Image: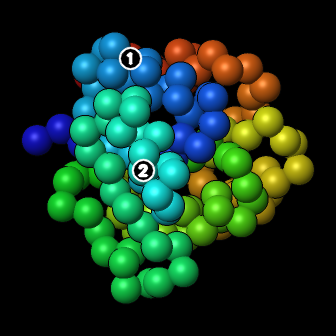
Amino acid sequence: MNDYILVSAPNVQGEDFIKQLQRRHIPFAAIVNNKNEYERMLMLQVSTIIVINTMDEATWRIPELPVGRIFLFERSLNLCCRYIQICRSWTSKSIYVITDSSNPRLIYKGMGANFVIYSGSAETSFLITNELNG
């Protein structure tokens, strides 16, 4: 079974990335931590959504699906750090943080992110490499 890409998409960049994955038929799941995000993912027709209560460690169980690479689009430093903390044990593959701020790079690396990508553009197709495309 192929690994799923896990995506936190709380902004326009993340939404674009989800659309890119959908167009290419790459298996992925979205991770959300509130009802508004869950409903946004439903509106984007995301079929696999993992709901996490970031304040309750008991909900941080490893998902049933095989998690591969993780792409976290930053909306808040605290939430992004929490997602890294939660998801790091879910995969041995890379965690990517996509941010439009240059400040948190070392924080995210220290938390366990493999790559911190600075991008102010809403265009995310550059993130989908041939490796991801199967």
Amino acid type assigned to the residue bearing label 2 in the image: Tyr
Do we see residue 76 in this rendering? yes
Query: Which residue has dot 2 on it?
Result: 38
Residue 56: where, in percent of width, then height? 47, 84
Considering depth in this image, is 40 or 71 the residue closer to the camera?
A: 40
Task: Tell me the distance, in whole angstroms, between the alpha carbons under discs 1 and 2.
Answer: 29 Å
Residue 66: where, in percent of width, then height? 22, 52
Q: Residue at x 75, y 59 (%)?
A: 77
Taking 55 as reference, is 103 left or right? right
Q: Residue at x 26, y 45 (%)?
A: 48
Considering depth in this image, is 107 or 77 the residue closer to the camera?
A: 77
Q: Which quadrant of the view contains residue 84?
A: bottom right
Q: Is residue 120 above or below residue 59?
A: above
Amino acid type assigned to the residue bearing label 1 in the image: Asn
Label 2 element class: helix
Q: Is residue 49 above or below residue 20?
A: below
Q: Which quadrant of the view contains residue 78?
A: bottom right
Considering depth in this image, is 26 or 13 the residue closer to the camera?
A: 13
Q: Which quadrant of the view contains residue 3?
A: top left
Query: Which residue has dot 1 on it?
Result: 130
Quadrant where the C terminus is found in the figure = top left
